[in-house]
Image (cartoon, helix red, strand yellow):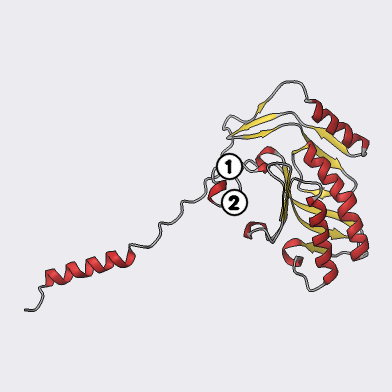
Amino acid sequence: MAPSRFTLLLAILFLSACIGGDRPEPAPPARPIAPRPSGPITLSGQTPRDTQQCFADLSRAEVRFSPLPDRDYGSGCVVLGAVQLLDIGTPVNGLKAIRCPAARALTGWVRHGVRPAARHLLGSDVTRIDSYGTYVCRGIVGGGSRAAGRVSEHGLANAVDIGSFVLADGRRISIERDWNSPDPQIREFLRIVHRSACKRFVTTLGPEYNAAHTNHFHFDMGGRPLCR
């Protein structure tokens, strides 16, 4: 006996359910961290001794900077013991608030890592460093499920991202374009300054860490030591 049209319809619906049953649900989009609508709260209190020492270290190194007030921006984004860097000897654009220990590490990296490596390997001075900034109230990018909902070190003004280096001879060394440059001197320069950062920052991430860092170095002073 030939199957009825109703029986055939049930069979088609059953097969469709089986075929699509193992398809994973789409991941929910990442939710940006929203700052407090009423604006930041300025925190009062004495400056901790280690922060005072850090300010003294910057002054001793002849770094021009302005201390910034401690502020709570909401959603876990709190900026404590931060400065605005004005002059560390080599211009670094895009910098906002940065905690003093990270500013001190950045200064040492530029002066004792980046500039000597550029002169030795590239035969030119670094005249500018292009950054992707320091403070921004957001979550961790590219950290997978373990990082979901966690505030980035950028949300604590405890991190800085570096994108490229401009030389006196006009060349621009880009981390995204030149990490695997056909020029061995450029490749070695980027790897040396990456290793130099590992000695000064707690966390140093580059293009070989994950896809979120293919175009920049990420440096921060939080969490556990990591050099990738």
- For disc 1, the marked residue is 150
Q: Work out whether 101 lies above or below 91.
A: above
What secondary structure is found at the residue carrying circle 2? Answer: loop
What's the mark number on residue 25?
none
Q: Quadrant of the C terminus?
A: bottom right
Residue at the image position 76 percent from the left and 48 percent from the top: 94
Left or right: where 109 falls relative to 131: right
What's the mark number on residue 143?
2
Q: Extreme front residue here?
A: 225
Task: Bin the neighbour count of mark 1 within 10 Å (Cα to Cα): few under 14, some 14-19, many 20 and up.
Answer: some
What secondary structure is found at the residue carrying circle 1? Answer: loop
Q: Work out whether 188 lies above or below 31.
A: below
Q: Examine the image and state in which quarter residue 97 appears.
A: top right
Q: Extreme top residue here?
A: 45
Indicate the position of residue 44 as horizontal and vertical percent values: 71, 21
Q: Do the residues labelled 2 and 1 touch (CB within 8 Å)?
A: yes
Q: Work out whether 92 lies above or below 23.
A: above
> Tag 2: residue type?
Gly
User: Quick one: label 2 or label 1, which is nearer the N terminus?
Assistant: 2
Q: Quadrant of the N terminus?
A: bottom left
Tell me the CA gap for discs 2 and 1: 10 Å
Indicate the position of residue 165 as horizontal and vertical percent values: 82, 58
> Tag 1: residue type?
Arg
